Image: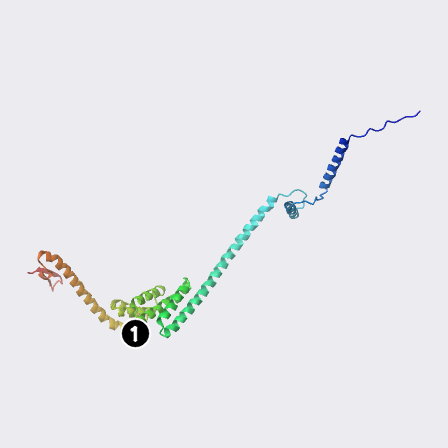
């Protein structure tokens, strides 16, 4: 007896396709799990991976995930510390640069002053005046430059004095003395300019100041002897001029009433020193 086994029925094409598709998916999944790259990894992905690897290496060596934010906070603190430590350095660098700039400016101002001195020695007063002005413009406005600025104002004063510009001579001497109140040459030049303008009281005061600073100054002593009578004479003259003006003013008022100052006479009492006014027609 012969047993005939039935032939196996063919699988449907759809099922085969599904199995094939499932096999392909499984293969792809297995490939992904094993870490194989498909060749289209983006730069951002690579950077992120690199960051993660770096954080893992800096961590405790555990296999767990690392919180990137926890590692960024100390980083920010370190940046702040760096900024704080570099700020004083920047300030010191700025201060050093300013000091160097001021020293250069002072050297330039001194050079201009020396050129002015040479021109003054050659009696080129106008040109020397310009050099001293240049030195004043270049000199920085700092305490270290007060001396050279005072000298340049004093030198401008002597140039103006030589040129006969006495008003501006006094102005330059005033500026020099503001910077250096004991600048004797500025006092001498100012007293000369005041005397030229017949400001005898002011010239006398300057020479007295010079004598206070230098009691052995013979020039100041001679100037005081010469100026005192001139100052007294001018005071008397000014007094007479003032009385004359007051008299004219009184006559203009009294004239409305048919009178004048001449109708009034002042008589001094020798015992008391007071005056009594009497009216005379």
Q: Describe residue 101's horizontal placement relative to residue 66 as left or right.
A: left
Callout 1: SS: helix
Q: Position of residue 108 (x, y in %)?
A: 44, 67
Front residue of this view, candidates 49 and 125: 125
Q: Describe residue 268's horizontal placement relative to residue 70 as left or right.
A: left
For disc 1, the marked residue is 219
On the image, which quarter does residue 154 sit in? bottom left
Quadrant for the C terminus in the image: bottom left
Residue at 19% in and 67% down = 237
- Please rate how many residues cluster around mark 1, counting C-alpha atoms within 10 Å: few if below 14, some from 14 to 19, many from 20: few
On the image, which quarter does residue 257 sit in? bottom left
Task: Tell me if residue 153 can be seen.
Answer: yes
Q: Describe residue 61's horizontal placement relative to residue 102 as left or right.
A: right
Task: Tell me if residue 146 can be seen.
Answer: no
On the image, which quarter does residue 70 sit in? top right
How many circles with numbers are drawn on the protein? Answer: 1
Q: Position of residue 152 (x, y in %)?
A: 37, 67
């Amino acid at each position: 007896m012969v047993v005939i086994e039935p032939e196996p029925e063919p699988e449907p094409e759809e099922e085969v396709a599904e199995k094939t598709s499932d096999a392909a998916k499984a293969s792809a999944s297995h490939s992904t799990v094993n870490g194989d790259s498909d060749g289209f990894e983006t730069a951002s992905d690579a950077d992120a991976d690199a960051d993660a690897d770096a954080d893992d290496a800096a961590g405790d060596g555990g296999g767990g995930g690392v919180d990137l934010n926890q590692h960024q906070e100390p980083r920010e603190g370190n940046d702040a510390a760096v900024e704080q430590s570099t700020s004083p350095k920047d300030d010191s660098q700025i201060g050093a640069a300013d000091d160097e700039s001021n020293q250069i400016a002072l050297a330039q101002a001194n050079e201009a002053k020396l050129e002015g001195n040479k021109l003054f020695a050659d009696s080129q007063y106008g040109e020397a005046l310009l050099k001293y002005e240049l030195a004043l413009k270049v000199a920085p406005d700092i305490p270290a430059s007060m001396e050279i600025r005072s000298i340049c104002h004093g030198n401008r004063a002597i140039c103006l004095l030589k040129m006969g510009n006495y008003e501006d001579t006094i102005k330059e001497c005033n500026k020099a003395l503001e910077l250096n109140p004991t600048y004797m040459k500025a006092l001498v030049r100012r007293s000369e300019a005041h005397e030229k303008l017949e400001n005898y009281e002011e010239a006398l005061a300057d020479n007295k100041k010079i004598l206070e600073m230098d009691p052995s100054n013979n020039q100041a002593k001679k100037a005081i002897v010469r100026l005192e009578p001139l100052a007294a004479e001018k005071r008397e003259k000014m007094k007479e001029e003032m009385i004359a003006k007051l008299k004219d003013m009184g006559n203009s008022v009294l004239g409305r009433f048919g009178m004048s100052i001449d109708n009034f006479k002042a008589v001094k009492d020798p015992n008391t020193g007071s005056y009594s006014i009497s009216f005379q027609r």
